[in-house]
Amino acid sequence: MQHDDVTSEDWYEESYIDFCRRSSHEAVLMDFLTTHASGTLDISHASSLLSIGPGSGDLEVSIINRCFPKLTNYFAVELNMGHANTLAEIMTKEMPNVEVKIWNEAVQNFPGPPQKVDVVMMTHMAYYLHDCLEEVVRKVMGWLSPRGALLLTQKGGKNGAIHMGEMLGIKYDIPSKRFYAPEVRAVLNQQKCVVEEFVMPMDMNIKDPDWRMACWSLHRKLTAEEAETCLKFLKEEVLPRCQIRDGEVECCEQIVFKVALSDSK
């Protein structure tokens, strides 16, 4: 791809597609949820689900089909209007027997679903909450049914591409205070709730990296010069330090936190 593409209107979508193509994070998360839905996670009984920040719903239908066989009510809060509209179309088409309600607003301003819900999902979006993660978690716990649970998935730590950006001194468009699991864990431990933690390894095939990998990790467009610098840094500095397993680069872990009300057991 030519460097002038780094300033195209489609930069974010192109970067995200490339990220998903290279990463095993979606497959790993799906396998984990499917395997443990009726056991360790105890979510297969849920008839209502609230998804916070689900994007355009790439995983929503698959997750519901595999993990929520009794679902009758699906709620979602999505800030991006385009994603919210796409999500509504997908869910209405693919889930005709499920009542669907989607709000296009920030979860910080969301007053709550019309009823208590059995499961709330927050998947790789806590870092968007900046300094209000504590407030949002407290609100979410108040929306849960007595047997309900919050499933919050977040990166365990920095991967190679993010570390690369920091080493280069490139500024992120979003604060990194809530990027990783340790900060999320600290917030959850302040709540009056029961927290369980499940660690899942992720692979990222960046043996043949390009500017899009860095573009996605930095959450903004890169100039052609930055793209050249990032690509050089990936090849010369990041890859030699990574562990190779099964032909792919092992980058980081993702952690699923299950948060339940303290009196739900």
Image: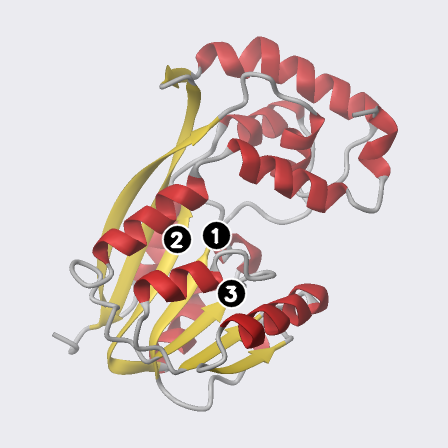
Q: Position of residue 115 (x, y in %)?
A: 40, 90
Q: On the image, numbered disc 1 is attached to which residue?
A: 124
Callout 2–callout 1 Cβ contact below 8 Å: yes
Q: Which residue is mark 3?
A: 132
Count the numbered circles shown: 3
Could you classify mark 2 by the number of other residues whose Cα lies within 10 Å: few (under 14), some (14-19), or many (20 or more)? many
Q: CA distance from mark 1 to mark 3?
A: 16 Å
| Residue nearest the viewer, comparing 77 with 196 | 77
Q: Callout 1, which amino acid?
A: His
Tell me the residue that label 2 is attached to: 153
Eye-nearest disc, 2 or 3: 2
Residue at image position (62%, 29%) is 165
Which quadrant of the structure image shows residue 208? top right
**Label 1 Cα neighbours within 10 Å, binned few <14 / some 14-19 / many ≥20:** some
Horizontal side, residue 104 vs residue 196: left or right = right
Q: Is residue 202 left or right of residue 57?
A: left
